[in-house]
Amino acid sequence: MNITIPKTAEKTIILPTRAELLKGIMIIAMSRANMSGMYPMGIAFAAVLPLEKAYIGLIGMTIGLAASGASVGKYLVALFLYYAVIFLKKYTGEYTKAVVLGLSVLVSGALSFTWTGISRDSVLMLVIEAFLTGGILVMVSTLGEKSERGFLATLVVAGGVLNGVSDMFIPYINIGLAPFAAIFEIMCICYACELPTAVMTGGILGLMTYMNQPQAVLMAGMLMIAAFFSALLSRVGKMGTAIGFLCGITISVLYTDNLDVLHAAELFGAFTLFALIPEAVHIKISSAILNLVTPEYEEPEINRRVSAQLKTVAKAVCDLADGVTFLSGKNLESARMREMFDAVLARVCKNCALEKSCCHKNSRKTYESMYEIWQAMEEDGYCDHTNIPLSFRQVCVRSESFLSEFNHVYELYKQDALYQGEALSGRGIIARQYKEISNVIRALSHELEAGCVEVELGKCRFSAVISELQEPKRGQAVCGDSLVHFERGNKYFVILCDGMGSGEAALSESRLTAKLFEEFLKAGFAKETAVKMINSALALKADKESFSTVDILEIDLETGITDFLKIGSAQSFIKTKSEIAVISSKAAPVGILENVEAEVEARELKSGDIILMVSDGISEAGDGVLKNEWIKKILSFDNRRDEEICRLIISGAKARMKFSDDMTCVIIRIKRNRE
């Protein structure tokens, strides 16, 4: 019989973070930006989103276009065509993507002529819109770059957003939101930047904000003049910046003899807000703006040479990986399969009242049921009461113990198959190692090209306080679990490893795994890359039945975003003000399978939230599907210190555990630092 170890499907849709929701709101506003009957801003910004977050752009565009009365169908078809081509061809270059998006707009626009009718003007506008959409895509793809190009893209996006809300007013005071915000932004940039940047800002924001109005060019010129005077007087301070802007606008209005283009309430409202904001806030705004307009790093010649050499090495290592022959899994003999089944029966069914009936009289039916359980294990990567045959549950009186033992023996079976060369190939593992090393070298070359330099970060918004308690298995001198925790930049890592077995042997295995992960993560490797490389290395070890579970926690101390990466490890618990959530994993421990597909689950935590990490000596204590409810009950009390919670959980596990095992309890509390 053939064994196929299914590969976990890649995640195609990712839930939006706070930043992604903000992008969705911006897409709504930009989709409403009318540029002479064209709406290229929203679709260009939506096309920047990666494929797994494309739905955010689709929703934002639909809402924005519908609110503006534009043709929703044409742009949705264009975006669908764009993502289809990008997905099939795997294009990555921004100029190639711009061409694809422009062609998608052309095709969808041509299709729309079937119900809107065709004319020479409509064809001309469609061609212009296609070129404009592609150009805006190239521009917005540079957002976030610390360069003049990235700053220009930021101005265009800001202008598109303001254009989209140009028909909205601030409640109760009847001030236009778009001109009010544009004037305030221009004054902030005039206060922070040099004269040329300030004048460029006035022109771009003025033109973009009023693009759907006849006086767009006039307003661009007036705001450029106002920005010129504002930047000239910015050396005096923020009041000089504001007064300079007022003087520039006054001169422009008197020269053009047009008093209706800008309402006094909008001008003086922005002036008042700018003047009332404390100097400390202005310094922060100025710092952020200056960071955007920092010139691009001029890469030394030696960086280019070293980067080219690294790329050459990466290609050579990748070619070496391709040259290593990968052997697929061979057929396993049915005798070895029966040997595994017999081992489970010997451990569980001995002295059972139904032993004669199951193991002798109805042995064929019993083995068929076990084979179905084995198939469920192969397909799902785990086995519990949710995926075993109903007929087995109705007959077996020791189903709980049977499933626990089956999972244990299955792990040993896989490990033994590895060393016998029947399920996995050592050559495949080595090839995968080469691939990962090639990817790491290539990433280093890209960083060197970009001139990336790590800087020492200041004090973060959050800090993490850790409490831990360990209990060795009964009869053992040491606990076989290993725990490490450290900071790297603004990230805080906690790694908990549980070695196979107990005592010194398990401690040696878990300590090695934890040390490897610590070194890889401190060196700057991504969690996923570290998992693949370390798993391959441990799988090649000569020791039989040697593996370790891995539980990695990564906390961003600046945002509170916390990543959970689990490989064969026990459940973790998150206590917030509203709930106690459970994070679990079904991936096999490291060192068993050649290809570990570990998924990262992200949660946003706040000050006062608690994370509980435990080893399986604690998580396996209790019975039934609600066996971990006692842990939640202990966590639900608010007035207990973290050390006391650890002691209560260890004591509770010892009282409930049928078979003694190593126990580790770790509590990480998130705290907000004082400003």
Image (cartoon, rainbow, N blue to C red):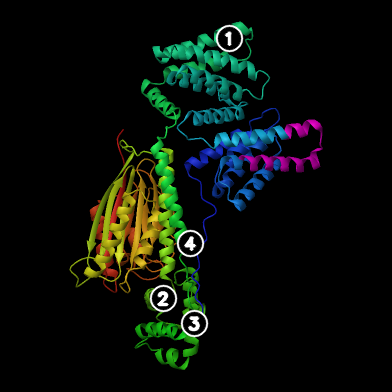
135 is within the stretch colored magenta: no
Residues shaded magenta: 98-126
Marks 2 and 1, how far apart at CA: 82 Å
Q: Are marks 3 and 4 in contact (CB under 8 Å)?
A: no
Query: Of the residues shown, which amino acid type is indicated by label 4?
Result: Asp
Horizontal relation, residue 318 to residue 622: left or right: right
Q: Residue 52 in the image: x percent, y percent? A: 54, 50
Q: 47 or 270: nearer the eye?
A: 47
Q: Which one is earlier in the sequence, the residue at label 4 or at label 2? A: 4
Q: Which residue is mark 1?
A: 252
Q: Quadrant of the C terminus?
A: top left
Q: Which residue is mark 2?
A: 421
Marks 3 and 4, how far apart at CA: 41 Å
Q: Which residue is mark 3?
A: 369
Which mark, residue 322?
Answer: 4
Kind of element beneath mark 4: helix
Kind of element beneath mark 3: helix
Pair 2/3: label in front: 2
Q: Residue 501 in the image: x percent, y percent? A: 28, 71
Query: Of the residues shown, which amino acid type is indicated by label 2?
Result: Gly
